Image: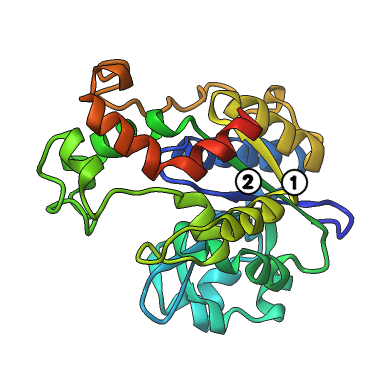
Amino acid sequence: MDAAIPLPVYYHVPKNAGTYVTNMSLLYFRGFRRNYTDWNDRGYETIKNVEIIDEHNNTLARLITGDPDNMCVSDVLMSNNDVDTSHHRVMLSDLTSSCIHRLKLFILIIEDHGFSMGEHICKMVKNNRPYQEYVTIREPFSRTVSWYSYITSEASSHEPLHQCVKTSLENYIKSDIFESNWLMRKLIGVSDSDDFTYEHYEQAKNRLNNFNVYNVRDTDQMIDTMFGTCYSLTREDFPPGIPPPARNENDLKGKIKFEDLDPVIQQQYLDRTYWDRKLWEIYR
């Protein structure tokens, strides 16, 4: 990609339409490949999903990238970590500038284990391009219900918390595993065991000043703006015959209302999500 083209960087907050953003990014990239490159004639898959991991095998980020020279197959650092011909894994410490230089980066997606390292990862992979950071946020109780619905379903059987949340939503809100201030904690590296303070809130808010922040209901607007601004693409560039992906819906959407909770639980929830709600008031 031209060095003057900004690299879009999306921070994937669980239950904030992140899977949909990833799928739409791939659709936009397929349109870019079809209309503006000759990569379709190479005889192999030229769009790759490169998963960047740490020494504990945690996913820090993923690159949706063009690979017209099939470098991911020939490069020893990636070819030894194949998942399939379009999905590769590489240690962050092994990701060299020469390796990045040979790829055509389309979007960098920061995953939860990489949030506090986001700026470092961006600087490692941007290949002299400017970059633009994006994130979606969601009304806190709506996200809580969505996360609870997911973590108690079979869809989350691979998650460490799957066996821990076999209880009601009210008991989950009271429990030690309840998530609060997730985005802000991840961005600035505050652990779940530490109290979240006003100073932490200000630090996270200042970090978010560098982001393009969108309400999750405006996810499509964010996606179209992201690829329109960076690559001058529109939905007219989508490959014909491929419909946009559907968004995931949780089974409890609209079925649990905050006012239906026990009043004591309501107050506990408000206390535990105080900083989440302060942040939401800025970007709602």
- C-beta proximity under 8 Å, tags 1 and 2: yes
Q: Quadrant of the N terminus?
A: bottom right
Give me the residue at 51% from left, 67% from top.
189
Give me the residue at 46% from left, 58% from top.
112
Q: Position of residue 65 (x, y in %)?
A: 62, 56
Give me the residue at 58% from left, 69% from top.
117
Q: Position of residue 167 (x, y in %)?
A: 11, 40
Direction right: furthest residue: 4
Give me the residue at 71% from left, 79% from top.
97
Residue 154 in which image quadrant: top left
Could you say which disc has been placed on residue 37 in the image? 1
At label 2, the amino acid type is: Asn
Q: Nearer the viewer, residue 105 or 146?
A: 146
Task: Look at the numbered disc 1 and give the secondary structure of its residue.
Answer: loop
All told, the count of numbered labels is: 2
Task: Look at the numbered disc 2 and give the secondary structure of its residue.
Answer: helix
How crowded pointer 2 is (Cα within 10 Å; few <14, some 14-19, many 20+) is rated as some
Using the image, determine if residue 220 lies above or below residue 1: above
Is 161 on the left or on the right of 118, as rendered?
left
At label 1, the amino acid type is: Thr
Query: Is residue 63 visible in the rendered structure shown here?
Result: no
Using the image, determine if residue 211 lies above or below residue 267: below
Residue 223 in which image quadrant: top right
Determine the CA span between mark 1 and mark 2. 8 Å
Q: Position of residue 269 (x, y in %)?
A: 33, 37
Please give the residue where the numbered disc 2 appears in the rendered image.
40
Q: Position of residue 224 (x, y in %)?
A: 69, 29
Q: Nearer the viewer, residue 5 or 69?
A: 5
How crowded pointer 1 is (Cα within 10 Å; few <14, some 14-19, many 20+) is rated as few
